[in-house]
Amino acid sequence: MPLYQAIVLAIVQGFTEFLPVSSSAHLFLVPWILGWPDQGLDFDIALHIGTLIAVLIYFFRDWLQIAAQTFGWRYGEDEELRQSPRLLWYLVLASVPAGVAGVLFKDEIETRLRNPFVMGTMLIAVGLLLGIAERYSRRERHIGQMTVLDTFLVGVSQTLALVPGTSRSGITISAALFRGLTHSAAARFSFLLSSPIVAASGLKSAYDLSKHGLGEGMLAPFLIGAGGSAVVGLGVIAFFLRIIRRHGLVPFIAYRIIFGIIVIALAIVRSRG
C-alpha cells in the first residue's frame, strides 16, 4: 500500500469514526471514488486499533470512575456519572445485542450490502432519522438519569450499524435523543458504548492477523494507520462534543443527505458506463 493512501485513509477513519456520518461507508467509498484497490485486512486492523486508542485515551478518566463506582470505590468528580453507579453494567447490557448480531450476521451483511447504492441510501435514511430526533426529542436528561430500558434500546439500535452507511454513533445518538437525553449526554454515551464493540472487533482482527502476520511492506502503512487514526480521532471527539453542544446535529444531517445523494448519483453513472 502506498504511504499516501495510508495517510489519507487514516485521516478519513479518524474523522468519520466518531462523527455520525459512517466510517465504513467512507472507507469503502473514498477508495471506490479514487480508484484505489481495497486496503486489505491488515490495514483495517490498524484502523481499529487507532480508533480504540483514541476513545480509551479521551474517556480514560470516565472509565476509571465508572469502574471504581461499580465496586463502591470513590474516584472521580463527575457528578453525572456519580448518579449512575450501575453504568458499567448498563454499558455491558447495551453491548450485548450488537455483539450477538455481529457474530451471527456481520460477514453476510458486509458481503451482500457492501455497495454504493445501499450506503448512499443509509446515509440519507439515517440523516433523516437524526433530523427527526433533532426536531422532536425532548433533550432534558443527562447520562446519570439513564435507565435499564434506555440503555437496552440504545444497544438494540446499535445492531443497525452493521449495515454499511448507517454509522454507529449516528444511530445510537438518534436512539438516545428519542429517549430524552441531551445532545452531550447522547454523544457521550454513544462514545462510551463504542469502546466494548471496537475493542472486541480489534481483538478479533488482531487474532486473525496473528495467524498469518503482517503482509510484506505493510509495517509502515500499519503504523501510519493506527497512529494517524488515533491522533485525528482524539481531536475529532473533542471537536464533535463542542459542536454538538453549540449547534446540535444540523451540520451532520445536511452532510449525510448531500453525500448520500452524491454517492447514489455516482453509482448510477458508473453502472451505466
Image (cartoon, grey):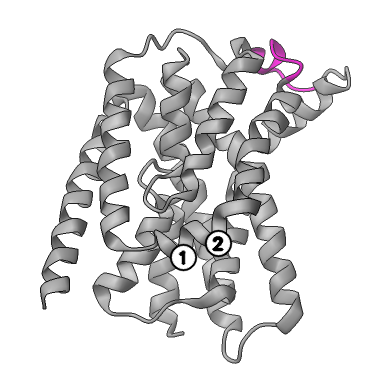
* Residue at 39% from the left image edge and 45% from the top image edge: 166
Q: Can the viewer see residue 51 in this picture? A: no
In x, y percent, where is residue 234?
Answer: 52, 47
> Which mark is drawn over residue 111?
1
| Residue for badge 2 | 107
Asked whether residue 78 is drawn in magenta, I would say yes
**x, y (%) of residue 246?**
32, 23
Q: Label 1 sits on what residue type?
A: Thr
Horizontal arrangement in the rendering, residue 223 relative to residue 138 (left or right): right
Q: Position of residue 23 (x, y in %)?
A: 42, 54
**Figure check: 134 above or below 100:** above
What secondary structure is the magenta-colored segment mainly? loop
Q: Secondary structure at mark 1?
A: helix
Give the residue drawn at x 26%, y 52%: 120
Residue drawn at x 31%, y 30% is: 129
| Label 1 with label 2: CB-CB less than 8 Å | yes
Tell me if I can see residue 4 in this picture: yes
Quadrant where the image shows the C terminus: bottom left
Few, some or many residues within 10 Å of mark 2 (<14, 14–19, 20+):
few
Q: Please identify the residue farthest to the bottom as the structure is shown.
A: 216
